[in-house]
Image (cartoon, grey):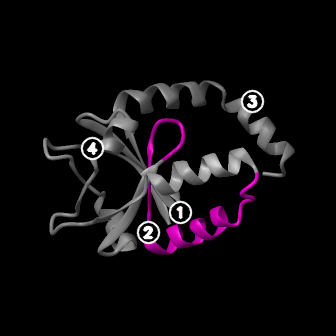
Amino acid sequence: MFIGEFQHNIDVKGRMAIPAKFRQQLGAGAIITRGLDRCLFVFSAKEWESLAEKIKSLPLVQANSRAFSRLMFAGATDVELDNQGRILIPEFLRKYADLDKKVIVTGLYNRIEIWDEEVWKSYKAKTESASDEIAEKLGELGI
């Protein structure tokens, strides 16, 4: 499982080190794609296969299903970890998530998210200020 929050940098070539604690779970490579809320998602091969099966079973006739499939699959690419545990984030994905130099890498159980540091700070502050309301709504779902 991926958990935690880490600050990292992207170098001039677009490479970023995966936190050491996450590397073993990814093995030699991973899949990176557009995420939600202006971040990138990184999945292990096993988790990606599981998600892909669910997405491909969505009804083709629903516009939201097609849009989500396109978001996830068209932007997905395989990445390999180099000897220093770095991945190369393609330029189109860096642009999508507004990634420049400083990034936040978060572990969210079955995936890793990569955020621009300032976008993450803003998102986190907004979420923390609404934590009571969020908890109440999740309570309605039995969480």
Q: Earlier in the sequence, mark 2 or mark 1?
A: 2
Residue at image position (75%, 59%) is 59
Residue 23, how many percent across, how many down? 32, 67
Residue drawn at (43%, 33%) of the image: 120
Q: CA distance from mark 3 to mark 2?
A: 32 Å
Q: Earlier in the sequence, mark 3 or mark 1?
A: 1
**Residue in view at x 53 percent, y 72 percent:** 49
What is the secondary structure assignment of the residue under circle 2? Answer: loop
Residue 142 left/right relative to 10: right
Q: Say if residue 107 shows up in the picture.
A: no
Amino acid type of the residue that numbered disc 2 sits on in the rendered structure: Ser
Circles 3 and 4 in contact, beta carbons < 8 Å? no
Spatial CA span between label 2 and label 4: 21 Å
Vertical side of 19 occupied by 138: above or below: above
Count of numbered circles on the image: 4
Mark 4 vs mark 1: give the one in front: 4
Q: Position of residue 108 (x, y in %)?
A: 52, 54
Mark 1 surroundings within 10 Å by alpha-carbon count, few (fewer than 14), some (14 through 19), many (20 or more): some
Question: What separation in Å lies between label 4 and label 1 (alpha carbons)?
Answer: 24 Å
Q: Which residue is mark 1?
A: 110
Kind of residue at badge 3 = Glu
Q: Nearest to the eye among marks 3 and 1: give it.
A: 1
Residue denoted by label 2: 44
In this rendering, the label closer to the viewer, 3 or 2: 2
- From the image, tell me which residue sits under label 3: 133
Circle 4 residue: 91
Check disc 4 and report its element: helix, strand or loop: helix
Mark 2 vs mark 4: which is more N-terminal? 2
* Location of residue 18 in the rendering, given as x and y in whole percent from the top left corner: 29, 57
Front residue of 93/111: it is 93
Range drawn in magenta: 35-61
